[in-house]
């Protein structure tokens, strides 16, 4: 059977960076085996649904290069792909479980259950609706048939068998064994007729022929319940892979939005309200994908810079880690920098024009500036910051840089260069070598010469190659900047 995987987010807000990683692992596995990647929207919890979440999810996947093979927008033979459109299917399968005595109706009110919880809490015990107490409650196991028919609202619960060992395999963690006595009779169909996550995802995975369920580690405790559901229907279980948690940098808990706000890094792929995403922060899709793929998986070599196609070719699910992966924003930025450096300037301009609209008006000049700066840029937003001096002379000078100069020598250097260019003794292409030769005669070191000129041109001791800068700004601006800094030194 061909590999079929699904990414099944809930439209209850923006897609978290952890959810994006889950989508990536599903997509990579599907493409590795020339299989199918399905997008399924789990939107049965209408109370928690947030407007525009569904479009956000699709846009986030599209930005990192994932196009679903099947889904609510692309169609397919196994739809509908929104769970809210599949309620009749869930009811049909819930009735099958009732007929086979694998499930039952329960009519307890929330007030009834609350009282029981509080009573047990006083005794220091946890409440669990299960084989140990189900006959004490109001359900189709304890009420006469005619009374059941009179009650209009109720839930459908799974009947967990007594004293059984439930065993299921996880491809990452191995065999998992749980006693049925530890499990609760989970609600499958809620009082409003909608399914719970546990029921809907098992039914959908089976009907959509899902071969591999790749999801976060937080769903691991639900695995025995899901195995019981498969067994109740007599269905084969798919392969399960529960990905390790993404931890905060300290390794002390799951990465949260609060961690991002505290440390100053994005937690969402795209902008959501006032929160900038990785896209707006200046990440290349390839850079973010590279980092997320390595967050819990190893390629089995020292190679770290990977494009998505290369990752697909070498991907091996056996190399997914068991332990949680610490999130390191600095490492993510470093990988992004490598992808910027490995991308041609014209390609950067064509793919991400919004980041270069203010660096110059002429496209050819933009490409030249990108070429000059890209070795220094970690994020796409760095290009505008690093290129501001191309448009106009420095409005101020970094005083820490100026303090490192011998002011007298700096003035002499700038005046000689200004006079030599004005007198046509030097050209913009030759001035550097000419000034170094002159410095040897005057006993002024090369470093001292270039530091003075760099501050004059860009305002600080940081910046790209000086000859390249001078050629791009032109002789008129070059001379003006030399003169302005000489005035400042006076």
Image (cartoon, helix red, strand yellow):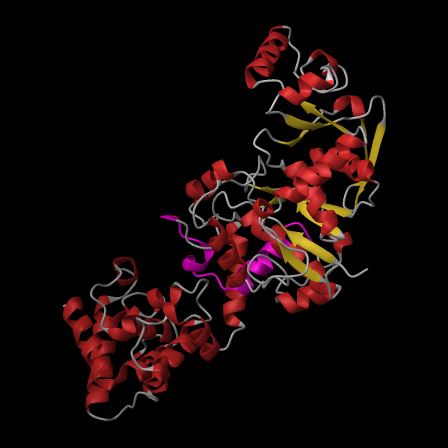
Q: Is residue 93 magenta?
A: no
From this viewpoint, is residue 461 visible?
A: no
Q: x%, y% of residue 31?
A: 70, 64
Residue 79 vertical position relative to residue 307 in the rendered view, above or below: above
Q: Quadrant of the N terminus?
A: bottom right
Q: x%, y% of residue 141?
A: 75, 18
Query: Residue at the spot x=59%, y=38% of the render?
Result: 251
Query: Residue at the spot x=65%, y=15% of the render?
Result: 126
Tell me where residue 300 sits by quadrant: bottom right
Tell me where residue 167 sits by quadrant: top right
Stretch of the chain drawn in magenta: 273-297
Q: x%, y% of residue 445?
A: 35, 74
Q: Is residue 276 magenta?
A: yes
Q: x%, y% of residue 440?
A: 35, 81
Q: Is residue 393 left or right of residue 128?
A: left
Relative depth, front residue between 102 and 4: 102
């Amino acid at each position: 059977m061909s590999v079929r995987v699904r990414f099944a987010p809930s439209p209850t807000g923006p897609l978290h960076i952890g959810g994006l990683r889950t989508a990536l692992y599903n997509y990579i596995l599907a493409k590795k085996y020339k299989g199918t990647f399905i997008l399924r929207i789990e939107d049965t919890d209408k109370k928690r649904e947030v407007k525009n979440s569904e479009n956000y999810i699709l846009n986030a996947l599209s930005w990192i290069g994932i196009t679903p093979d099947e889904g609510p927008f692309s169609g397919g033979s196994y739809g509908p792909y929104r769970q809210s459109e599949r309620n009749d299917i869930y009811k049909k399968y819930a009735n099958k479980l009732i007929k086979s005595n694998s499930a039952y109706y329960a009519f307890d009110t929330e007030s009834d259950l609350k009282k029981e919880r509080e009573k047990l809490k006083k005794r220091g015990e946890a409440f669990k609706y299960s084989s140990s107490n189900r006959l004490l409650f109001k359900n189709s196991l304890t009420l006469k048939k005619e009374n059941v028919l009179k009650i209009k609202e109720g839930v459908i619960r799974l009947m967990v068998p007594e004293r059984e060992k439930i065993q299921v395999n996880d491809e990452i963690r191995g065999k998992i064994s749980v006693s049925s006595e530890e499990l609760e009779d989970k609600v499958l169909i809620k009082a409003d007729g909608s399914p719970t996550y546990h029921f809907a995802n098992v039914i959908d995975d089976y009907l959509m022929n899902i071969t591999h369920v790749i999801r976060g580690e937080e769903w691991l405790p639900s695995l025995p319940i899901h195995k019981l559901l498969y067994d109740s229907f007599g269905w084969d279980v798919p392969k399960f892979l529960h990905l390790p948690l993404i931890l905060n940098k300290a390794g002390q808990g799951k990465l949260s939005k609060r961690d991002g706000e505290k440390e100053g890094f994005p937690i969402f792929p795209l902008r959501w309200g006032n929160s900038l995403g990785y896209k707006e922060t200046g990440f290349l899709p390839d850079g973010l994908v590279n980092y997320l793929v390595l967050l819990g998986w190893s390629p089995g070599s020292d190679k770290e810079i990977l494009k998505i196609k290369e990752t697909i070719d070498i991907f091996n699910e056996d190399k997914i880690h068991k332990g949680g992966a610490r999130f390191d924003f600095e490492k993510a930025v470093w990988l992004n920098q490598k992808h910027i450096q490995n991308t041609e300037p014209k390609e950067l301009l064509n793919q991400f024009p919004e980041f270069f609209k203010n660096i110059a008006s002429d496209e050819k000049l933009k490409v030249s500036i990108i070429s000059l700066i890209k070795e220094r840029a970690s994020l796409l937003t760095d290009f505008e910051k690093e290129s501001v001096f191309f448009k106009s002379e420095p409005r101020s000078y970094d005083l820490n840089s100026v303090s490192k100069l011998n002011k007298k020598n700096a003035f002499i250097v700038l005046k000689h260069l200004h006079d030599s260019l004005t007198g046509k003794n030097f050209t913009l292409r030759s001035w550097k070598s000419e000034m170094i030769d002159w410095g040897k005669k005057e006993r002024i070191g090369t470093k001292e010469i270039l530091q003075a000129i760099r501050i004059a041109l860009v305002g600080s001791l940081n910046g790209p190659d000086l000859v390249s800068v001078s050629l791009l700004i032109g002789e008129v601006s070059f001379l003006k900047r030399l003169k302005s800094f000489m005035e400042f030194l006076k």
